Amino acid sequence: MTILPARRTDISLHTADGLTLVGELALPADRPPVATLITLHPLPTHGGYMDSHVLRKAAWRLPALADLAVLRFNTRGTSSPRGTSEGAFGEGDAERFDVAAAIDFAEFHDLPRRWLVGWSFGTELALRYGRDPAVDGAILLSPPLRRADDDDLTAWDEFGKPLVALVPEFDDYLRPAEARARFARVHQAEVIGVDGAKHLWVGEAAVRRVLDEIVSHVRPDVPIPLPSAWDGPVVNGDGGDDDTR
């Protein structure tokens, strides 16, 4: 629950169909970012939002530990403490405009080396709508491959950009053996089975594994595993300042 130093700014995204989406951009505290994560949250009708814990901890840690920019936002009709994005849940179809708005924001603000990081429902959005020349690649956490189908995988193969899928051993929807078979049509795809993990990546060990894998692919020059201690000012998850390690 520790928040490491960063420049955090509330942002608004504007979609081509006229909606305003709420979000946050976290940047390294005292230097430009080296790469960017555009995060796509789990299914909002089942509790997913921009503060879903893996994405929240990525924003709390990775600007300081890996010089990454982390962009989080609520898709249409989704609420969080940051606020509620306009519109209504689009069953994964209208959200194409939301993904495009996030990519456009990152490109307009010159955020470098833009990677999509989708979790569950967010992986479907990445696969279906993330094939944009401004995107360097995508990392998928717990891909269910329900709304996204084999045609989307074939299209990503033709897109040619890196695709990394982290698949929990005990996932509720898609487990490593089946995932390897499904993703085989994407020649550049890397499927990583994660022993002992479940769809929701519950527990600090699971979160650390996810963040380590993200950094190892987006910033391969950063040593892994990431540090688990920090000397310097921090903010606790309850909002209180804390200058202890």
Image (tube, rainbow, N blue to C red):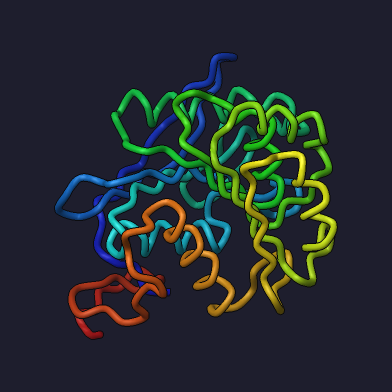
Task: Say which of 159 and 201 sits in front.
Answer: 159
User: Is residue 85 visible from the viewing direction of this image?
Assistant: yes
What residue sits 62% from the left and 43% below the top?
A: 188
Q: Which residue lies furthest to the top in this view?
A: 17
User: Is residue 86 visible from the viewing direction of this image?
Assistant: no
On the image, the x and y values in percent for residue 109 come to: 30, 28
Would residue 115 be found to the left or right of residue 236 on screen?
A: right
What residue sits 26% from the left and 56% below the top?
A: 6
Quadrant showing the N terminus: bottom left
On the image, the x and y values in percent for residue 141 come to: 64, 56
On the image, the x and y values in percent for residue 93 come to: 74, 26
Q: Is residue 118 above or below residue 212?
A: above
Q: Is residue 99 above or below residue 59?
A: above
Q: In which quarter of the image is residue 123?
A: top right
Q: In which quarter of the image is residue 239?
A: bottom left
Q: In this view, does 180 lie above or below 65?
A: above
Quadrant showing the C terminus: bottom left
On the image, the x and y values in percent for residue 215 come to: 42, 59
Task: Say which of 32 and 74 sits in front.
Answer: 32
Would residue 121 be found to the left or right of residue 175 on screen?
A: left
